[in-house]
């Protein structure tokens, strides 16, 4: 199996699409991961424009393929289960559009964050419980998973599967899925469209080399 080396093109947001692709090609890489909104931004991908026009999608892919490149993934990392409704709604809308575009453009994976809910229904801010005691932290963790995280990703996993797309959740501190344990826990509670977008640096940052994954 041939493994392709690529780059997350958000690094080159100051370049336009053609400049970025020329730079990637000249660097000898074979794949690009392109931001479609959320935290990565959309410097190289106008979701609405591409969703609306088959001609624009074809022209876009021609730019990629003519340089011997492929799109490994679209990325829209954000917090779709945020207690801030506007944040959650924007993240969800971008995710849904990104999955639809991925299907139309034969992109196999959409990368994002699991998100982090609040501590209860009336929370204003995300809450990241990472210790089981005092017991209110365990209670919050259980509430988040059962009432927010699992229901949301069950639905989105089904949606992605219907569109032939896999979801890569980046294991990142501050979000409910942040370790191998929490990744597998969510996958087992939802479906096999949910997988990992692995950035090992986040795991070292969290101390995975010298302590057990927390749950």
Image: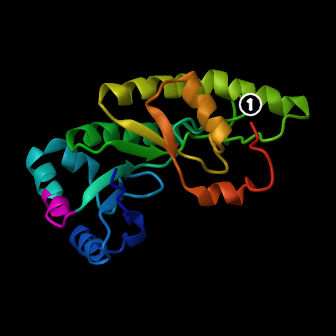
- Within 10 Å of the Cα at label 1, are there few (<14), some (14-19), or many (20+) other Cα atoms? many
Q: What is the basis of the colouring in this image?
A: rainbow
- Residue lying at the far right of the rendered structure: 134
Residue in the image at 17% along x and 57% along y: 60
Up the image or down, 40 lies above or below 116; here it is below
| Nearest to the observer: residue 71 or residue 1 | 1
- Residue lying at the far left of the rendered structure: 55
| Nearest to the observer: residue 112 or residue 171 | 171
Label 1 secondary element = helix
Up the image or down, 199 lies above or below 185; here it is below
Mark 1, residue position:
141
- The quarter in which the C terminus is drawn is top right
User: Is residue 86 at all visible to an observer of this figure?
Assistant: no
Q: Position of residue 117 (x, y in %)?
A: 64, 35
Horizontal side of 165 relative to 133 (left or right) equals: left
Up the image or down, 199 lies above or below 151; here it is below
Q: Is residue 67 magenta?
A: yes
| Nearest to the observer: residue 126 or residue 173 | 173
- Residue lying at the far front of the rendered structure: 1
Q: Which quadrant of the view contains residue 16?
A: bottom left
Magenta-tinted stretch? 62-68
Q: Position of residue 110 (x, y in %)?
A: 39, 43
User: Is residue 80 at all visible to an observer of this figure?
Assistant: yes
Q: Is residue 77 magenta?
A: no
Q: Position of residue 127 (x, y in %)?
A: 71, 40
Q: Position of residue 188 (x, y in %)?
A: 57, 25
Up the image or down, 81 lies above or below 174; here it is above
Horizontal side of 185 relative to 52 (left or right) equals: right
Residue in the image at 18% along x and 67% along y: 67
Q: Which quadrant of the view contains residue 19?
A: bottom left
| Nearest to the observer: residue 107 or residue 51 | 107
């Amino acid at each position: 199996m041939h493994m392709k080396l690529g780059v997350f093109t958000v690094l080159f947001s100051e370049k336009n699409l053609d400049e970025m692709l020329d730079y990637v090609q000249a660097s000898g890489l074979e794949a690009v991961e392109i931001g479609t909104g959320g935290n990565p931004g959309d410097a190289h991908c106008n979701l609405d424009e591409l969703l609306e026009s088959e001609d624009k999608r074809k022209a876009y892919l021609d730019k990629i393929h003519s340089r011997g490149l492929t799109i490994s993934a679209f990325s829209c990392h954000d917090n779709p289960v945020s207690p801030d409704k506007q944040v959650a709604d924007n993240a969800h809308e971008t995710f849904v559009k990104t999955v639809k575009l991925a299907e139309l453009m034969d992109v196999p994976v959409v990368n994002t964050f699991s998100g982090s809910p609040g501590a209860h229904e009336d929370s204003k801010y995300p809450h990241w419980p990472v210790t089981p005691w005092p017991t209110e932290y365990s209670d919050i963790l259980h509430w988040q998973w059962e009432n927010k995280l699992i229901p949301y990703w069950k639905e989105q996993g089904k949606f992605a599967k219907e569109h032939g797309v896999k979801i890569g959740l980046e294991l990142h501190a501050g979000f409910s899925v942040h370790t191998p344990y929490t990744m597998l826990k969510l996958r087992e509670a939802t479906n096999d469209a949910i997988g990992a977008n692995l950035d090992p640096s986040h795991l070292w940052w969290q101390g995975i080399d010298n302590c057990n994954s927390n749950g």
